[in-house]
Image: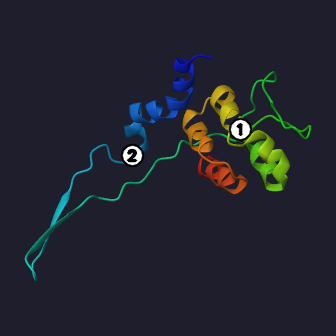
Amino acid sequence: MGLKSVLGLITWPFRFLWKHKNRFLSENKIEKQVVINEDSKKVSSRAPAISIKHEKVDFNLNVPHENPFYLNNGKVLNNLNELSNELISMDSDTFHHHVNDQKNDFSNWIKDVIHSPELAIELSATHDIYSTREILEKHRV
């Protein structure tokens, strides 16, 4: 794998987020509000709060029969609901086999098979089971 390919793999989440940044913001323009405190005649400015929209995904939608997720403990997952439920009782060794510093198999499966790039990007940034469950739940329909 060449240097250009490696750099492409490393930078794709950032390029995707930059390209689609307006989809993640509830307001496309952030305008400063000027607030004048009449008592002290001070002028301050502040930006309005920004809320992030989370892509909602149907957790019960099964993947094609040729693309299930195979856990290293032998279990087979066919949708995000099964993944979410399995994470509740998954042992640390199984989780870290699929999610570690070198890879995030859950994120890759969600990006490539379920076709949910926003969820995949969020999952790629975490390496612990609790954050993974939290992120999944934010995206549940």
Task: Report which residue position mark 1 lands on.
Answer: 106
**SS assignment at label 2:** loop
- Which residue shows up at 91% across the image and 41% down it? 73
Q: Position of residue 140 (x, y in %)?
A: 63, 47
The amino acid sitting under disc 1 is: Phe
- Which residue shows up at 85% across the image and 53% down it? 91
Q: Position of residue 40 (x, y in %)?
A: 10, 81
* Quarter of image, res 62: top right
- Looking at the image, the residue that sits furthest to the front is 3
Q: Position of residue 51 (x, y in %)?
A: 41, 54
Q: Which mark is residue 5?
A: none
- Which residue shows up at 62% across the image and 43% down it? 123
Could one spot residue 47 in this view of the protein? yes
Please tell me which residue lies in front, 1 or 49.
1
Please tell me which residue lies in front, 134 or 5.
5
- Which residue shows up at 79% across the image and 55% down it? 88
**SS assignment at label 1:** helix
Q: Which mark is residue 25?
A: 2
Measured in 3D between alpha carbons, the distance from the residue under mark 1 to the one under mark 2, in whole angstroms, is 25 Å
- Residue 36 shown left or right of residue 128 in the figure: left
- Residue 131 shown left or right of residue 22 in the figure: right
Q: Residues within 10 Å of mark 1 (few under 14, many from 20)?
A: many
* Quarter of image, res 100: top right
The amino acid sitting under disc 2 is: Leu
- Looking at the image, the residue that sits furthest to the top is 2
**Residue 55, placed above or below residue 11:** below
Please tell me which residue lies in front, 3 or 115.
3
Q: Position of residue 41 (x, y in %)?
A: 7, 77
